[in-house]
Image (cartoon, coloured by chain):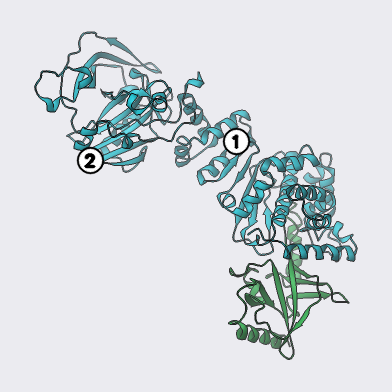
Amino acid sequence: MIGKIFFMCTVTIFFISKSWSQDNGKLCVCFDQSKYMDVRLRSDSTYTDFKVVKEGFESKIKRARTTEKSKNNFLEADPEFYLHFYSVEKPDVIESVVGLCQELVELNKFRKSNYKKPSNTFSNTFIFLKKLPGDRYLKWEVMLEPEE
Amino acid sequence: MKKNYFLLLVVIAFYACSKEEYNSVEDEKLVPEYSVENVMFKNKKMPSSLKNIFSKIEEGRNEIFNDSILYLEEYDVEVVLTSSFNVSKGSYDSYTFPTIQRLDEPIKNLLFSKNKNGDYDAYLVEYGYSKNDLTELDFEEIPKKFKITPLQLDLTALTKQPISYFFCTYEYFWTPDQGQLVGVGNTELGRWVLIARQCFTITYENNGTVGFTIDYEEGTANYSTGSIGVATIPMDPVITPFDDEEMARMEYVAGILGLNNVQKSWFKTHVQSLAVVNFLEENAFSAEAVAFGKKATLALIHGDYVDFSYQVILSESFKNNSCLNGVYQDMGNASAFNTYLNNFDGDMSVANLTFDSSPTLPVNINAETSAPENYMITITFNENNLTRPRLSVARTLIHEIIHAEMFRKLLSVWQHPSLDGITYTDIVAMKEDYPGLVDYYTRWKNNVPQGMDATSAQHQAMAQHYRNVIINSLKEFDDSYSDDVYEALSWVGLKNSIAWNNLSQAQKNSINSTLYNFENNNQNCQ
């Protein structure tokens, strides 16, 4: 199932790579939620919290070890293993992603590149896309919760 | 006394190029299209024969000479050896060094000029005008005269056994002013005369100090005449921007700061160094001041901006980023930040802060504040996360300054240049000084409540106690938004805190909606 979703995301990226807008500057991230992302949707779907695990901290054991190591260092903030995104609107179901994004990447690639936005994307909001059956997508406009 | 000296004057420069009347005929004939180059002391490009002279200076120097000034006691002239101007064209080659002198004294330079044998002869060139004259008189009013005194620089004598020798001071004069050659009949030689004005017997002494006596032998000088020749055309004066007192202070401070040779060389030739000197003197050379002085010097060398009043450094990348520097300036720079912090707590300040920026921080990091290193705390902004409203960038700025302030509080109790090695016991021991902060460090550091992601003890404290500082400073920056925007902004970066967790879900949703609308409906900073 996971492989199928990944394949669909990849195919989607391939087919629309030439056709999206060059104007809105947004980065679209296509994801399969089962492996690297925890999605929590409010019951009325008006608020969605996305929690993406950082590369290298996928296993509970690794996270526990890192936390243990940090206990004696009072200067450093406790290690943060996730990137937090949130959406304050209901997701839309869309039929096409044409004109939606400046760039579209698969979630794992986004993770692998240390979550760097491509240089031609300039919006401070992201679009998360989840492929649905029948060439449809679930789309959220999301904000990244920054670490400071 | 000091008022009479040069005050942070001009960068060493030639004036000759713009004054065509001055020696114009000779210049055209003798050194057409010369090249001019600033040559650092001991530069490898210096000719070996000249380097030999400097080697002798090195050998002859003792502790009363610093390593950048040669004192020609017989002329009471201090020559700045840090750098020189090299003028060359064909066989003509000269190196001119500035001297330290008062504004109202005739300008003097030490000139090394290549002779027929390929060696360099030394001359003291004295111009007929002072720095004051240059600035106050019209060009026509400046006396078109200078004199050149050949020097016998037996520099090895400075610390060797006592030695006596005899030499004369010769002076070249512009003949139309003197008239000595009238009637000689050779008008081609008539431009300059060489006159032996005075002759001396000098005895150097070596009794622990360097000194000598002079026997003046009046009447031993005879007139002689001749052409100045190719080798000794002096150019316009080279002027040191420093007086002797300043040079001495700079020398001392360069040593205190532990600068390497390249840094020292910069330090002694740039007027910005005096700000470092003044800062250290005003702060009685405390360890903290010396640490900042070193950082400030390296920053100045790198082209960064240093605010000595508030001990703040702006990196070149920060300063050149229109968004970051614009927000910083519009927030009222360090002075206003100081006021914001002081309004909250009289002890707070922005001292020992560096503002920097980086293009390599991860996307989720807006900025980060380093723990103090040698008293210095660095706030680094993510250059890629500036596509957001200016008020949002200002919020990050004040958020990070509060982090810095918390580090500073810990540092003040810990009483070390950095917090390295600090332990749980040390933190607990600080309880009497900053009970609130210590409480957050000890209570939350290793006890993250179930269901919450970790955040720093500083964020816990900030969420509970410092959000009003953020709100008030943002309103000072831009008061055109509704209160709920400032309230929402104050929570950014603090959402893993206990204080945030204590809000109702409705409150959290409202804040997030406000933030979303704010971020998407305002012009971005960059």
Q: Residue at x 65, y 82 (%)?
A: A98
> Which chain's residue wears label 1?
B
Q: Which residue is mark 1?
A: B290
Q: Residue at x 84, y 74 (%)?
A: A46
What's the residue type where badge 2 is placed?
Pro
**Residue B97 visible in rendering:** yes
First in sequence: mark 2 vs mark 1: 2
Colour of chain B as rendered:
cyan
In the rendered view of the protein, which quadrant contains the C terminus of chain B?
Answer: bottom right
Residue B476 is situated, as x and y percent measured from the top left of the image, at 75, 47
Q: Residue at x 28, y 38 (%)?
A: B87
Q: Is residue B288 placed above or below B468 in the rendered structure?
A: above
Give the image location of residue A114, x and y in percent: 64, 68
Residue B192's label in the rendered image is none
Q: Nearer the viewer, residue B152 or B158?
A: B152
Question: Can you name the residue that lies furthest to the top here?
Answer: B218
Q: Position of residue B52 (x, y in %)?
A: 29, 34
> Disc 1 marks which amino acid?
Val
Residue B441 visible in the picture: no
The chain ID associated with circle 2 is B
Q: Which chain is green?
A: A
CA distance separating discs 2 and 1 = 49 Å
Label 2 with label 1: CB-CB less than 8 Å: no
Quarter-wise, where is residue A99 in the image? bottom right
Label 1 CA crowd tier, 10 Å (few <14, some 14–19, many 20+): many
Q: Establish whether labels 2 and 1 are both on one chain.
A: yes
The residue closer to the viewer here, B51 or A131, is A131
Q: Quadrant of residue A85?
A: bottom right
Helix, strand, or loop for circle 1? helix
B12 vs A95, nearest the viewer: A95
Q: Which residue, given by chain and number where applicable, does mark 2 sit on?
A: B32
